[in-house]
């Protein structure tokens, strides 16, 4: 974020700081925490893990301060060392800037209804933006837990998200992300805007061919 204003000035871009690593995982009995003995399927299954590069960290934006400490993310005792840092005044002002006609997503964007996924918000069946230019990659699978306990745990509907880093050039000037209408965001019990869906920052130097 500290290099955001250096865009287009020859700054070096980095690749993703993680890689997917497959590894074998034991099948556990439902009633007991011991390896399940299954002569037909075997006792192991293949699972994909995400390995972070040394010296890197995941960053989350939170609306509330979180005490520093060790937290359990997910199941099976996966722990993270969490540190909460305040936003600087410069970052606060940046998030309050209107995104204008050209902007980039810093969080994956999920657009469309519960049945169809789109590359831009749709309101009452019509595109909410008149997109003049779009720079993106393949959509990413998007799913999250809806809460619950035990056998009542629920997963959200599977969707596809426009990946972070996608650049839009639209015809009309748009306000800051937090001022976008709630109708632009899908709802599944609650609006995905609650999770920061499609959080964007202005990118004034982005233009379409011929401008």
Image (spheres, rainbow, N blue to C red):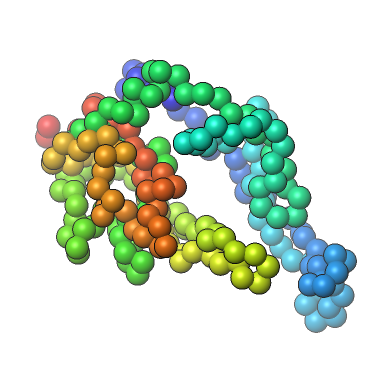
Q: Percent position (x, y) of residue 183?
A: 26, 55
Q: Is residue 11 visible?
A: no
Q: Please state if 101 lies on the left or on the right of 182 as rendered.
A: left
- Answer above or below: position of 88 versus 74: above
Q: Please state if 105 lies on the left or on the right of 80 as rendered.
A: left
Please name the residue shown 23% across and 27% down the image. 204
Work out whether residue 87 or residue 4 is closer to the camera in this orientation and state it.
87
Quarter that holds the N terminus: top left
Please name the residue shown 25% across and 48% down the image. 181
- Answer above or below: position of 9 versus 205: above
Work out whether residue 181 or residue 57 is closer to the camera in this orientation and state it.
181
Please name the residue shown 61% across and 70% down the image. 152
Quarter that holds the C terminus: top left
Residue found farthest to the bottom: 40
Task: Say which quarter of the image contains residue 147.
Answer: bottom right
Q: Percent position (x, y) of residue 15?
A: 51, 35
Q: Is residue 171 visible?
A: yes
Please name the residue shown 52% across and 57% down the image. 144
- Answer above or below: position of 145 versus 96: below
Q: Please state if 51 lies on the left or on the right of 76 as rendered.
A: left
Task: Say which quarter of the image contains residue 90.
Answer: top left
Q: Percent position (x, y) of residue 182?
A: 28, 51
Tally of numbered tags: 0
């Amino acid at each position: 974020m500290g290099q955001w204003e250096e865009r287009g000035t020859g700054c070096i871009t980095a690749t993703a700081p993680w890689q997917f690593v497959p590894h074998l995982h034991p099948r556990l009995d439902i009633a007991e925490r011991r390896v399940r003995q299954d002569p037909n399927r075997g006792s192991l299954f293949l699972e994909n893990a995400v390995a972070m590069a040394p010296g890197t960290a995941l960053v989350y934006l939170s609306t509330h301060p979180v005490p520093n400490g060790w937290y359990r993310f997910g199941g099976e005792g996966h722990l993270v060392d969490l540190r909460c840092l305040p936003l600087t005044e410069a970052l606060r002002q940046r998030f309050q800037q209107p995104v204008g006609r050209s902007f980039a997503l810093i969080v994956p964007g999920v657009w469309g209804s519960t049945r169809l996924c789109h590359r831009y918000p749709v309101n009452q069946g019509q595109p909410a933006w008149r997109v003049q230019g779009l720079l993106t990659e393949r959509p990413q699978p998007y799913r999250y837990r809806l809460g619950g306990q035990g056998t009542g745990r629920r997963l959200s509907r599977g969707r596809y998200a426009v990946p972070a880093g996608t650049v839009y050039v639209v015809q009309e000037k748009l306000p800051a992300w937090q001022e976008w209408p709630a109708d632009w965001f899908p709802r599944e019990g609650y609006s995905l805007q609650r999770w920061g869906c499609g959080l964007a920052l202005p990118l004034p130097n982005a233009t379409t061919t011929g401008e």
